[in-house]
């Protein structure tokens, strides 16, 4: 048995890169994007080829397997292993050279595909293959799997675009494979020469034949291309350290034709007929995978067919020719790049969307990408559907219809013995069906553990034995990624779900989308790693902490992996008390970006709150949880005692402010925000508003930030709402006995009952939720519901100005108080400022601002509330331009907490601060969240304003 400490010490002595055998590193690499889980001994991040050779030598000496790993998005299990994982993403991730004249690039295996595309684009070049995970998959992983992507009908597979490779064998030989037997290990050529007949007749001829080893690439008529034969070998033959790739000339213009069909069979049958028109893509997807409201032509399934040209007109003409040739229900041709990206996002997100059936039940990979000849795709799909029905299974196919390659997630039961047995039976029968149609078990993602056991059904025993002999030539000791491709592990072994608890975990939130099961919520993360992108576009948010640090443990996927291992209890052994999970979650901003941007709806902000609730149960919490988690209490005391001025004066004295920050767990670099001299509700009472009149009654929510820190927002909102003809009231502050229920001016009086009334303030509980003080949050929200009973008895909406508070009321409150139906009623009443005006004052014309606008859409608004009404309101007011996405980085208490300042600043510098700096001089800076305004002021010296303030100022200027 291997001594982990001895192995780790030997690796640290031999390599210059990082060696990590700790709990977190191992937990992060137990899984890829497949159904499988294998626990490694440790992780090594080599700095260069010398480090790779040294690590292989140490592992060979200790008899320990080695698993090369890139982005960890493999779907067949080949990026998991029980030995040492070589992580190429940390250091060996560079573009070494790019030759525009020759149309080539030299890359390291850890380079993310999008980084290569960005470097090639200015030269009019690109790498042809482009999987849907292009923003996070690595070139090494693509070569290992022989990845393809949506443009393979035009530019082929990865193997078609590889010139030469640099590899190191398990025994330390450094080779440079290429055509003409270049870089072949000793014994490979004689092996091939003795099997020429088998190689010429035993391999299906179809564009997406990825299964098995590409030994036929070594035939003389195929130039005896050793580099090509290594593509798709899944790290089982040699370790890649460098690759020379061929780039293709990208068309100057593109047009996207979206062709609608009645169903997927119609789309599949039509796909092959479009190939003579030389499209760039022929992608298919069905209605089950399309979000409601998507801008697609009417139909039940669609083909996404891209055409290229030197000009937009030429590209459009080519796309319209394809439309005329296709027998469609409806069609759409798009040339606008932004709209094309939005449409492609629907297709690219399918790998995550497909993990949930329409009724919310789970679906899994395993038969993710088998391929048949394109002309047989329609017939194959009909047989595939029949086989699903025979086994009582469901799945929605999508994928590369033009290449005959189908992706599908199926609702296998992988949690019980009978379910796993059915998974095996179905897999065996489907393998036979694919072979009967002349297909390949894998058409893109490789065999891994999911399909390698079934390769004899496709190739026959003798050809599979040939694969084993090839493995023996390259890796005679069997150290490289054992259990994959040859001598495979059973397809129903090492399933990642088997380690999870069978009984539901006792939790505070209701997890309504996962039937109350926290394990099911954590299982949502299937590893497609959209959270690992290093940049975001449009209004996207997820995952700002990963973009700031580049560390897997700070991605949504990394945190989900740690929570999975916490529940499994094998690697993370101390459950809710785990310091490893706590530290990974510490830099989660609770921005909720993953709730909307993650294709499977992982909600890490909720998981973090749940974890902190259990982690600190019965224990002392960090000082910041008391200082900022209980912020509503401290601010109310300051208001009641009228000591805001004194507090501001003390905070302006540097030594006293420093002491307060140390005691409160606040970052020394932060300034303490000033308290308002007059809280919003005191201004309201002094103003003596009247809620009588003809306009529709709306109840304005006095959130903690508006009430005590920025009452100008509340005053502006009242000004605008009343100008729009609405009657404004505040929520009651007294809980009256039965019979004393009158909303009126929101200060319900009943002299006979005042002696028995209970006084209080409504609160969304946000600060308690974000710090995981869920018992306190339940108490606060329960009291809020008691106070709001008179409001809930009417049809008056609740207008919430602070986006984070609106999001908490709309989602967190009903999920935490899942046993109180009033919480759901409250959530249904919550409206944003713009939603209120659009819904209840649709004929009101806002004042003309007529200026450009800059700033950032609040992350909670993007993730939970949506900003379409805000966009329309800005447009109506003459505010031109778009707000950026991302997260401001302050995120409530996050950016104030000690130890978070650098990450907070990095998040702000990603999109918000550059957008403001680059805006026109006369631009209005909009920031609806108090955190966003504070971050702008403290880091950018800029005053941001809520949309209500912008409109109120324009009203005051209007004649």
Image: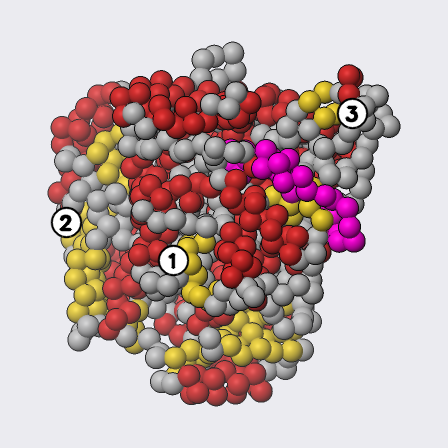
First in residue order: circle 2 vs circle 1: 1
Examine the rendering and report whether any part of residue 903 can be seen: yes
Disc 1 element: loop
Q: Which residue sits at x=35%, y=57%?
A: 915
Q: Residue 268's quadrant in the figure?
A: bottom right
Which mark is in front, 3 or 1? 3
Q: Which residue is mark 2?
A: 174
Identify the residue under disc 1. 134
| C-alpha span from label 2 to label 1 | 29 Å
Q: Nearer the viewer, residue 503 or 311?
A: 311
Residue on which disc 3 sits: 736
Q: Which residues are magenta?
A: 681-708
Instruction: Indicate the position of residue 419 as horizontal and vertical percent values.
Output: 64, 38
Image: 348 above or below 254: above
Q: Secondary structure at mark 3?
A: loop
Q: Residues within 10 Å of mark 3 (few under 14, many from 20)?
A: many
Name the residue nearer the viewer: 303 or 840: 840
Residue displayed at 44% across by 87% down:
313
Q: Secondary structure at mark 2?
A: strand
Which of marks 1 and 3 precedes in the sequence?
A: 1
Q: Residues within 10 Å of mark 2 (few under 14, many from 20)?
A: some
């Amino acid at each position: 048995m291997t001594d982990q400490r001895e192995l780790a010490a030997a690796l640290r002595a031999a390599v210059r890169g990082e060696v990590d055998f700790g709990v977190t590193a191992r937990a992060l690499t137990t899984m890829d994007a497949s159904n499988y889980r294998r626990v490694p001994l440790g992780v090594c991040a080599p700095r260069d080829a010398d480090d790779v050779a040294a690590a292989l030598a140490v592992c060979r000496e200790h008899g320990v397997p080695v698993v090369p790993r890139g982005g960890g998005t493999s779907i067949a299990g080949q990026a998991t292993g029980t030995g040492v994982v070589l992580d190429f993403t940390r250091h060996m991730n560079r573009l070494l050279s790019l030759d525009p004249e020759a149309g080539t690039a030299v890359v390291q295996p850890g380079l993310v595909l999008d980084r290569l595309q960005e470097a090639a684009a200015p030269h009019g070049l690109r790498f042809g293959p482009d999987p849907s995970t292009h923003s996070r998959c690595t070139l090494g992983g693509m070569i290992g799997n022989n990845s393809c992507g949506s443009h393979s009908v035009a530019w082929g597979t990865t193997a078609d675009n590889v010139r030469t490779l640099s590899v190191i064998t398990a025994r330390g030989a450094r080779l440079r494979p290429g055509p003409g037997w270049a870089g072949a290990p000793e014994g490979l050529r004689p092996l091939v020469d003795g099997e020429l007949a088998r190689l010429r007749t035993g391999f299906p001829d179809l564009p997406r034949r990825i299964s098995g080893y590409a030994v036929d690439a070594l035939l003389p008529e195929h130039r005896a291309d050793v580099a090509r034969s290594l593509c798709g070998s899944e790290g089982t033959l040699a370790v890649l350290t460098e690759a020379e790739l061929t780039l293709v000339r990208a068309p100057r213009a593109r047009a996207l034709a979206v062709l609608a069909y009645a169903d997927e069979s119609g789309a599949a049958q039509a796909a092959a007929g479009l190939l003579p028109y030389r499209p760039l893509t022929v992608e298919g997807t069905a209605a089950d995978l399309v979000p409601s409201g998507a801008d697609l032509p009417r139909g039940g399934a669609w083909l996404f067919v891209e055409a290229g040209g030197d000009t937009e007109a030429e590209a459009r003409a080519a796309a319209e020719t394809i439309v005329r040739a296709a027998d469609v229900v409806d069609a759409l041709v798009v040339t606008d790049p932004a709209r094309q990206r939005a449409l492609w996002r629907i297709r690219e997100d399918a790998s995550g969307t497909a993990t949930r059936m329409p009724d919310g039940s789970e679906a899994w990979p395993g038969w993710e990408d088998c391929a048949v000849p394109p002309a047989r795709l329609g017939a194959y799909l009909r047989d595939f559907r029949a086989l699903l029905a025979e086994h009582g299974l469901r799945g929605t196919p999508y994928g590369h219809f033009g290449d005959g390659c189908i992706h599908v997630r199926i609702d296998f039961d992988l949690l019980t013995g009978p379910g796993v047995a059915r998974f095996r039976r179905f897999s065996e029968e489907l393998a036979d069906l694919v072979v009967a149609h002349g297909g390949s078990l894998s058409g893109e993602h490789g065999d891994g553990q999911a399909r390698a056991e079934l390769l004899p059904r496709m190739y026959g025993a003798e050809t599979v034995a040939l694969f084993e002999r090839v493995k023996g030539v390259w890796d005679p000791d069997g150290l490289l990624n054992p259990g994959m491709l040859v001598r495979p592990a059973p397809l129903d072994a090492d399933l990642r779900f088997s380690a999870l608890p069978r009984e539901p975990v006792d939790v505070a939130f209701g997890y309504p989308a996962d039937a109350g099961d926290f394990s099911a919520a954590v299982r949502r993360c299937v590893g497609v790693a959209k959270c690992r992108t290093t940049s975001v576009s449009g209004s996207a948010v997820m995952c700002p902490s990963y973009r700031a640090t580049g560390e897997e443990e700070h991605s949504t996927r990394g945190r989900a992996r740690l929570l999975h291992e916490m529940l499994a209890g094998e690697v993370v052994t101390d459950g809710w008390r785990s310091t490893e999970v706590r530290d990974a979650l510490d830099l989660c901003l609770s921005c909720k970006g993953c709730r909307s941007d993650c294709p499977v709806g992982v909600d890490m902000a909720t998981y973090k709150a749940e974890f902190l609730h259990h982690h600190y149960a019965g224990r002392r919490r960090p000082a910041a949880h008391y200082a900022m988690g209980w912020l509503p209490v401290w601010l109310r005391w300051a208001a009641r005692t009228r000591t805001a001025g004194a507090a501001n004066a003390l905070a302006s004295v540097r030594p006293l402010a420093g002491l307060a920050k140390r005691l409160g767990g606040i970052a020394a670099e932060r300034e303490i925000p000033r308290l308002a001299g007059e809280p919003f509700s005191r201004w309201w009472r002094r103003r003596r508003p009247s809620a009588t009149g003809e306009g529709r009654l709306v109840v304005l929510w006095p959130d903690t930030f508006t009430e005590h820190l920025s009452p100008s927002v509340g005053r502006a909102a009242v000004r605008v709402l009343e100008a729009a003809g609405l009657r404004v009231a505040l929520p009651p502050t007294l809980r009256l006995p039965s019979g004393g229920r009158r909303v009126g001016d929101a200060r319900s009086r009943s002299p006979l009952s005042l002696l028995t009334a209970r006084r209080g303030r409504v609160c969304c509980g946000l600060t308690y939720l974000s710090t995981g003080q869920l018992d306190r949050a339940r108490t606060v929200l329960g009291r809020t519901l008691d106070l709001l009973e008179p409001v809930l008895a009417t049809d008056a909406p609740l207008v919430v100005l602070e986006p984070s508070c609106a999001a908490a009321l709309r989602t967190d409150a009903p999920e935490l108080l899942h046993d109180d139906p009033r919480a759901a009623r409250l959530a249904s009443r919550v409206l944003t400022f713009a939603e209120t005006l659009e819904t209840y004052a649709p004929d009101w014309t806002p004042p003309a601002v007529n200026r450009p606008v800059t700033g950032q859409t609040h992350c909670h608004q993007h993730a939970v509330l949506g900003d379409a009404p805000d966009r329309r309101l800005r447009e109506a007011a003459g505010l031109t331009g778009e707000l950026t996405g991302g997260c401001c980085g302050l995120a409530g208490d996050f950016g104030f907490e000690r130890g978070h300042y650098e990450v907070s600043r990095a998040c702000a510098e990603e999109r918000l601060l550059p957008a403001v700096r680059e805006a026109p001089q006369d631009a209005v800076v909009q920031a609806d969240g108090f955190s966003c305004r504070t971050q702008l002021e403290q880091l950018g010296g800029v005053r941001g304003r809520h949309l209500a303030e912008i409109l109120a100022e324009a009203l005051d200027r209007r004649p």
